[in-house]
């Protein structure tokens, strides 16, 4: 089947009460290495991801995918949020629910869910109530839930922002595995270390505008924009 | 003091001996209040859910009104339903006044705002938390609504039990539309009011004890269900 990528944004804007949160962003996201959307808090990273994933409706501009079939577009994407939202049921039932929503055959769901939980090393906790797990474990269930859907594009909105270093390492391992398995990962973060570890290319957002776009090595070695340089200098002591 | 002890002793004997009059009154009370809760839940839960996720003009005013109506005085509800059902009223034809049916209607009106307002709050809080995730997974419309309602079933049960508590404890509404007719529309609260004014303290006290016991049992049940649910599913 043809890929839903590339994803093209044309002059995309999003306004709230007249304030531009996203300001005429144009870019293309191709398949391949992971894309990291980097920027300070309030730069518009989360809003941009929600626009791309279709959770928000843009106030201006256009979003174009490589496919025009809305059903296929929806099923070929998944998203993991900063705060995992677990249904009040077991970890595996959370994954099975997502598979059911995606129209996966009943007989297949359980096996696929178990495999996904295996991949995030949570098979042993499959039958625990999801909400009684630690936040780090819940985020891994959220990743398993997204991964089980076998998405072409996986959006991750600051997936480790509320986690400790140990849980963060485990989440990053899973993200690398998902990318290695062939999914296109689009992740937002304000953490430079994480951007370096996971990014193939960096999209640097500053006050709702795309300030810079560069391969990760070049972005950190010789940032082209003054904003990116200032951000790297300001953040580096903290990573 | 003596009369209180005496009355209590008599009351306990009535309860222990399963006094037929007492049993009849208790059963009718439960029947009326449970029916009212059933009707109010049937209307109130979807109403609350609809207001929670719907966006329409006047929504905020409706929420304020609903919250205010939670404190509706039972006698006023009784009076309104009385006017509706009385022979000259718009629903007088049905001949429901002074029947248990009229009492069910009055209590339904009384507790509908409680169940609707509490479930509105629960659904709205949950929707705020779940909306993006459910939309991302592609759960839509009725599917999403059912998932949400099932996930907060214990909060909704609490809303329903709050309604039941209110219905079983009120006296004003059932007194006016039921008329407290012996053997027909006499329930615990109206009987307590009557027996007290007649001076038959043992029966009044016995009914009072049963009523308190039922209310305590209901609240214990609600508490245990919520506790267990929170411990089990977080």
Image (cartoon, rainbow, N blue to C red):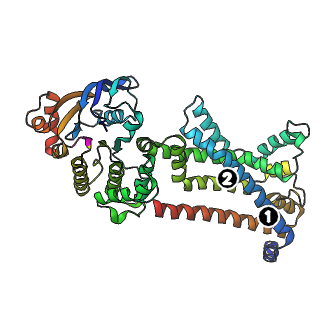
Q: Which residues are magenta?
A: A184-191
Decide whether the magenta segment is chiefly helix, strand or loop.
strand
Which residue lies at the image location 40% right of the left edge and 41% below the top edge? B136
10 Å crowding of disc 1: few (<14), some (14-19), many (20+):
some
- Circle 2 sits on which residue? B163
Q: Quadrant of residue B211?
A: bottom right
Dot placed on the residue nearer the N-terminal end, 2 or 1:
1
10 Å crowding of disc 2: few (<14), some (14-19), many (20+):
many
Left or right: residue B72 compared with residue B13: left
Which residue lies at the image location 44% right of the left edge and 52% below the top edge? A105
- Circle 1 sits on which residue? B27
In-front residue for pair A5/A130 = A5
Question: Would you say residue A185 sits in the magenta stretch?
Answer: yes
Which residue lies at the image location 63% right of the left edge and 41% below the top edge? B47
Indicate whether A181 appears above or below A218.
below
Q: Position of residue A98 (x, y in %)?
A: 42, 49
Question: Would you say residue A135 sits in the magenta stretch?
Answer: no
Indicate whether B68 appears above or below A89.
above
Q: Position of residue B6 (x, y in %)?
A: 82, 75
Q: Quadrant of residue B89?
A: top right
Indicate whether A174 appears above or below B203.
above
Quick check: can you spot residue B184?
Answer: yes
Under circle 2, the secondary element is helix
- Name the chain under label 2: B
């Amino acid at each position: 089947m043809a890929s839903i990528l590339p994803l093209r944004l044309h002059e995309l804007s999003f306004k709230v009460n007249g304030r531009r949160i996203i300001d005429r962003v144009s870019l293309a996201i191709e398949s391949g290495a992971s894309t990291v959307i980097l920027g300070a808090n309030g730069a518009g990273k989360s809003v941009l991801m929600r626009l791309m994933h279709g959770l928000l409706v843009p106030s201006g501009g256009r979003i174009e995918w490589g496919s025009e079939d809305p059903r296929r577009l929806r099923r070929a994407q998944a998203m993991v949020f900063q705060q995992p939202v677990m249904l009040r049921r077991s970890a595996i039932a959370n994954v099975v629910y997502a598979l059911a929503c995606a129209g996966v055959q009943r007989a297949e769901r359980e096996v696929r869910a178990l495999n996904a939980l295996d991949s995030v090393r949570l098979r042993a906790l499959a039958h625990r109530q999801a909400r009684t797990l630690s936040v780090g474990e819940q985020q891994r269930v959220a990743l398993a839930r997204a991964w089980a859907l076998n998405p072409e594009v996986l959006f991750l909105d600051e997936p480790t922002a509320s986690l400790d270093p140990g849980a963060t390492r485990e989440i990053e391992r899973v993200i690398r595995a998902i990318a290695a398995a062939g999914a296109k990962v689009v992740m937002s973060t304000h953490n430079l270390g994480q951007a370096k570890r996971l990014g193939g290319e960096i999209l640097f957002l500053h006050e709702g505008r795309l300030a810079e776009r560069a391969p990760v090595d070049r972005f950190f070695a010789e940032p082209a924009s003054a904003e990116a340089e200032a951000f790297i200098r300001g953040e580096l002591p903290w990573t | 003091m003596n009369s209180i002890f005496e009355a209590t002793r008599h009351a306990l004997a009535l309860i222990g001996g399963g006094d037929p009059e007492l049993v009849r009154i208790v059963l009718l009370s439960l029947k009326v209040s449970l029916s009212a809760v059933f009707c109010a839940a049937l209307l109130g839960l979807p109403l609350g859910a609809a207001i929670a996720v719907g966006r329409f003009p006047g929504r905020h005013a409706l929420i304020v009104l609903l919250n205010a109506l939670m404190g509706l005085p039972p006698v006023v509800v009784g009076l309104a339903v009385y006017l509706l059902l009385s022979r000259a009223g718009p629903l007088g034809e049905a001949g429901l006044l002074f029947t248990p049916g009229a009492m069910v209607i009055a209590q339904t009106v009384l507790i509908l705002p409680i169940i609707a307002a509490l479930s509105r709050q629960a659904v709205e809080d949950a929707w705020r938390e779940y909306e993006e995730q459910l939309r991302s997974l592609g759960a839509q419309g009725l599917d999403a609504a059912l998932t949400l309602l099932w996930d907060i079933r214990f909060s909704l049960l609490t809303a329903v039990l709050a309604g039941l508590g209110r219905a079983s404890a009120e006296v004003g509404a059932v007194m006016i539309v039921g008329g407290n007719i012996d053997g027909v529309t006499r329930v615990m609260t109206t009987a307590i009011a009557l027996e007290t004014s007649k001076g038959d303290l043992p029966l009044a006290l016995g009914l009072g004890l049963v009523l308190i016991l039922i209310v305590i049992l209901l609240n214990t049940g609600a508490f245990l269900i919520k506790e267990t649910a929170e411990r089990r599913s977080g």
